Amino acid sequence: MKKPIETPTKIRFQYQQDPNARLHTAHGVWGGINPNGEIEMNFYHESDALPTFSEQLIAPDGSLGHEIFPDAKAVRQVIRLVHSRVLVNYQTAKALLDWLEEQVAILEEEGAPNIYDAPVGIEQ
């Protein structure tokens, strides 16, 4: 007769980092519930749009003068570059929410609201 398989009393998770893993700054996230019932998060960072070109005046002595940008008075453009897309199911979302709340509580204990002078500005 076969001996029943015993349930282990503990499990060890070993972490490895993908060589292509990169650290990203997230200024915001955009997304929602996808057709499969997963939460889709598109993390982005924001920066001013680069001009297509710039010019510099040349002084009579041949030195470079100040830089001239095209459309300097045009509407400011901000680029939101989506660098990471993450899908999570309900259970993972709940675990992530719990973990984030714990981390925010730790920051708040350390005076986090005044750590940075810049506004957070995360959108959903």
Image (tube, rainbow, N blue to C red):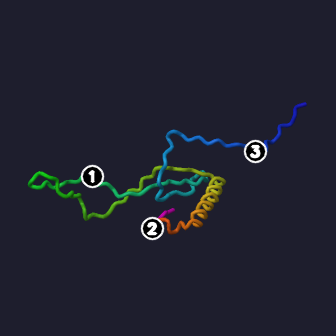
**Magenta region: which residues?**
118-124
Tell me which residue sits at (32%, 63%) in the image. Answer: 76
* Viewer-side residue, 98 vs 111: 111
Q: Which amino acid type is shown beneath numbered disc 1? A: Thr
Measured Cα–Cα span from mark 3 to mark 1:
58 Å
Counting residues from the start of the chain, the first of labels 3 and 2 encountered is 3
Image quadrant in which you'd find residue 71: bottom left
* Viewer-side residue, 49 vs 68: 68
The x and y percentages for residue 122 are: 49, 63
Counting residues from the start of the chain, the first of labels 2 and 1 encountered is 1
Say few, some or many: other residues with alpha carbon within 10 Å of mark 2 (under 14 / 14 to 19 / 20 or more): few
Q: Which amino acid type is shown beneath numbered disc 3? A: Lys
- Report whether 67 appears left or right of 49: left
- The residue that mark 1 highlights is 52
Q: Is residue 121 magenta?
A: yes
Tell me which residue sits at (62%, 56%) in the image. Answer: 96
The x and y percentages for residue 62 are: 11, 51
Where disc 2 sits, the SS reads loop
